[in-house]
Image: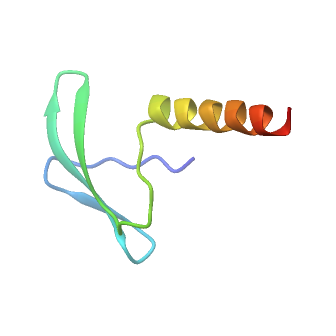
Amino acid sequence: MLVLSRHRDESIIIGDDVVITIVDIRGDKVRLGIQAPAEVPVHRQEVYDAIQKERGNNSNQASA
């Protein structure tokens, strides 16, 4: 895992077309702005996990 320090309004570039910007820092919360092409899915971890779980349930139902 790469760990970086950034201040508000500073960015991190991933590849050629994903930009993550620190929008705000309040206490222990950091707000991020993410610019990515429409074909690159961007989800919070808990949303991604739910999507993966649902896909697993759907594939199990399809094979039953």
Who's the residue at 76% across and 32% down the image?
A: 61
Q: Is residue 2 above or below residue 47?
A: below
Q: Answer with left or right where residue 11 lies relative to residue 23.
A: right
Q: Position of residue 42 (x, y in %)?
A: 41, 51
Is 23 on the left or on the right of 12, as rendered?
Answer: left
| Residue 19 point in image, percent of width and height | 31, 64
- Residue furthest toward the right? 64
Query: Residue 23's spot in the image, x, y percent?
Result: 15, 46
Question: In the depicted view, which residue is nearer to us: 2 or 60?
Answer: 60
* Type of colouring: rainbow
* Residue 7 in picture, x, y percent from top left: 19, 47
Q: In which quarter of the image is the C terminus?
A: top right
Quarter holding residue 63: top right
- For the point 13% across and 54% down, which residue is it? 9
The residue at the far bottom in this view is 16
Q: Which residue is drawn at 18% across and 21% down?
A: 27
In the displayed structure image, the side of residue 59 where residue 7 appears, left or right: left
User: In the image, 12: left or right of 7?
Assistant: right
Where, by quadrant of the figure, is residue 13 drawn? bottom left
Residue at 75% of width from left, 39% of height from top? 59
User: Is 38 located above or below residue 1 in the figure?
Assistant: below
> Number of labelled discs?
0
Residue projecting furthest to the top: 27
Image-quadrant location for residue 51: top right
Q: Viewer-proximal residue, 55 or 41? A: 55
Towards the viewer: 8 or 19: 19
